[in-house]
Image: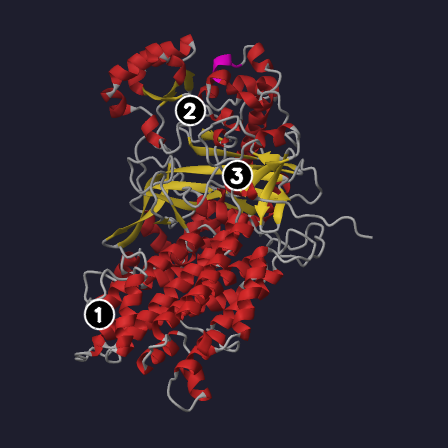
Amino acid sequence: MEAALAGSRGRAERPEGARERVARWSAGYRPAPGRPDEFLGADGAPRGAWPRLLDRLGGLTEPEIMARFVAAERHIRDAGISFRIAGDQREHPWPLGCLPLVIEGPEWAALSAGIVQRAELMEAILADAYGEGRLVAEGLLPAAIVAGTPEFLHPLHGVAPPGGHYLKLYAADLGRGPDGRWQVLADRTQAPSGLGWALENRMVLARTFPDFFQDLHVERLPAFFQAFRDGLALGAERADPRICLLTSGPYSSTYVEQAALARYLGLMLVEGDDLVMRDGRLHVRTVSGLKRADALWRRIDADFLDPSELNPASRLGVPGILDALRNGSLVMANMPGAGLVESAALAPYLDGIARRVLGEPLRLGHPRTWWCGDLEGLAHARANLDSLILRPAATPQRGAGRDAILAGPILAAERERVVAALRDRPFDYVAQEAAPLSTMPGWERGPDGLFLTPRPFVVRVFAARTPLGWQVMPGGFCRVSEREDVDPIELRLGIRSADVWVLSEEPVAAPLIGTQAAPRVRRVGGHLPARAADGLFWLGRYLERGEAVIRLVLAHLRSVGDAVGTDISGALDTPAALALRALLHEWGAIAAADLPTARLAQEALAGRDRPGSARSHVIAARRNAAALRARLSGEAWRVLADLNEFLSLNTERAFTESQLAGRAERALSQLAALAGLTHENMSRAEGWHFIELGRRIERAINTGAFALAFANDEATPGCLGVMLSLCDSQISYGRRYLQGAALDPVRDMVLLDPYNPRSIAFQAEAITRHLADLPALAADGIPEPHCRLATRILAELRSGEAADFDAVRLTALATDLERLADGIAARYFPTGPNALRPEKLTGLA
């Protein structure tokens, strides 16, 4: 996109008006033969809402348009909006397309009515399949379709869903049919994804084209999300329920959208290890002990939900969680087993079921489908195999995508296998009419500037069950292919996303705050899951480790020629330089202690294969931050991304000492910015205490290691100067002592001075304050073991003298600090069955 912008700037803008510009953009637009098109009507003119959008875009020059999208891409990168392809551990930048899909309000109203009807139909089928089974008994639905799909969960048969509904969220993938009408390509009821991506797309485009939303009367989304959140709590036992979003973790392909939804809706983002069953109810492991979970929006497949009754190999779920559904203490969205109605084998029977159950035919059709488990359907499939699409009757495995669908050349190449499969297990397949996906406009760049070209698309539309019934989101999640021959069935490379704009004829009022009953005022920080506390604790530790390595590199560069690249023969043999190199080698930041100075600094800062390099620690911090997206601000993520990019030096390029010193200094500035964001912008809730605890403990440990190397009994004045530099205490020392660096004063300042924010004593005081502010499990007033250890460490530092802290004493102090870190982990980050409830003090008058 930036290249396109550069091209636009290099070409003089044509002296044309908005109408001429729009005409030039669309002059060569030619839909592919046989594909329905969103943009052009039968008369060849733009139809629906497209003229309104193009007229507004025409008021901008091409460089202005591209500049806005370059800014959008920069925001996506800074905010860390990304996605993963199933089976790929790499994160890819979010591929937001350049044009939204626009739909007129009246057409959307008709489409929404069809979506609501379909959601009601799916709810009725699920209630019947897990209940009385009348549809099978009356011959409206073959029993093999219900009992034969792996999505039918037998342990849930006869279990009434808490709240009375199987579906809280329904989604449908839509496209235009050959007759130009919308049709359903797939139903999504298992754990529909894309809602968070739709939200992210809207937020990015609202920043990119804020004026367009007002001028074009684009329908807003906040009211839908508020109603959806209210709907998640329907049926909960408690009036003020705790709602959790269950994720499979940061390596899920949709984790970023899950974190965005949890942050936007105010939900607690949890993994299976965060949850435990006690006394028939689901609880969250928090740093305050076990806290009850009332509602769970699951984003993992149902068969992974309970390893004790469903998939025993699952490590994503919670043993015994189905008991909470049986006793009605947990509301779940969607109910396990809801994936049953995703089966493509249902399609031939849906219209008949709708007429029987709802009393009306389907408003939204689907491609003609034949289930091969039916004799007539099998005969039709065999007779027309070359012109049909063959696909699994059940939902294909996640990530299988188009590989599970046989059509055209693929079907011809595997014809022998397909014929054998239809003979041996015909009920595993459905046959569908081949209908190419409809197209919508996308930007292309030509020698004369931008022009519009048709691209295949699929749009996912969402309906939520709310306290007032089903409500359809006025927008959706659109996937657009960059190539004519690639269908955007699922998000992968070569597929871009697009926002969906529903345009009203009347101005759309901005969402109002306080349209519902105002919540009761509270000043509480909420409960922090133990896993999130663990991540924040280690985020602080990794950032501090990275800073320590950078300070060692800077100290070494400054000790050998003031980092100007001059000839400093012999300076590498000084005790200070030798100690700096030895410590970097001991920490795993460099491969050998005798490297040339520039090579050593470059490897310690940016070594990709060095586990102790500054870059490795920043990558580890970023990995922890990725699992905490719902709790970190966009500014913090942006600074962390900049820091990671800044330390990603080209290892094949040789940098000078002065260049590396400049990099190190700027990296320290980025770390200081992160610390400032934490200190000034982060709520003083439990999460802040843990990130600060991680920082303080790691800084104390590192300062102790520095003192062992540079403030030991044999320390030279050069070593003492390095010690002050590593603790950023030269100015304070110079103001306090007129003489040069001496051992006891230096030790006192970096170890025992309670006024020095870099001293160990300062860290110990901060640690005890943070621990005192964290919740205790017992109300008996007796300090917990980790608190007693922190108090003892602080007392030794307060009562000690500088001369007492020789190598033996410093080693013992380092051991105590490591024990303290382990004690904090054992108390606040329990795993397995180790989480405890807070004790209630009884027996007092």
Q: Which residues are magenta?
A: 141-145
For label 2, the crowd category at 10 Å Cα-Cα, with few meaning under 14, some 14 to 19 and many 20 or more, is some
Residue contact at pointers 2 and 1, CB within 8 angstroms? no
Q: Is residue 70 visible?
A: no
Residue 217 is marked as: none
Image coordinates for residue 198, horizontal then vertical, percent: 47, 45
Q: Nearer the viewer, mark 2 or mark 3?
A: 2
Asked if the magenta segment contains residue 688, the reply would be no
- Give the residue type that dot 2 points to: Pro
User: Colour scheme in the image?
Assistant: secondary structure
Is residue 818 or residue 567 the one in the foreground? 818
Is residue 290 or residue 191 the one in the foreground? 290
Residue that badge 3 annotates: 108
Q: Residue placed at 29% from the left, 71% from the top?
A: 579
Q: CA distance from mark 2 to mark 1?
A: 65 Å
Relative to 501, is 239 on the left or the right? Answer: right
Residue that badge 2 annotates: 367
Is residue 50 or residue 209 the one in the foreground? 209
Q: CA distance from mark 1 to mark 3?
A: 63 Å
Residue that badge 1 annotates: 598
Say if 239 sits above or below 709 in the image. Answer: above
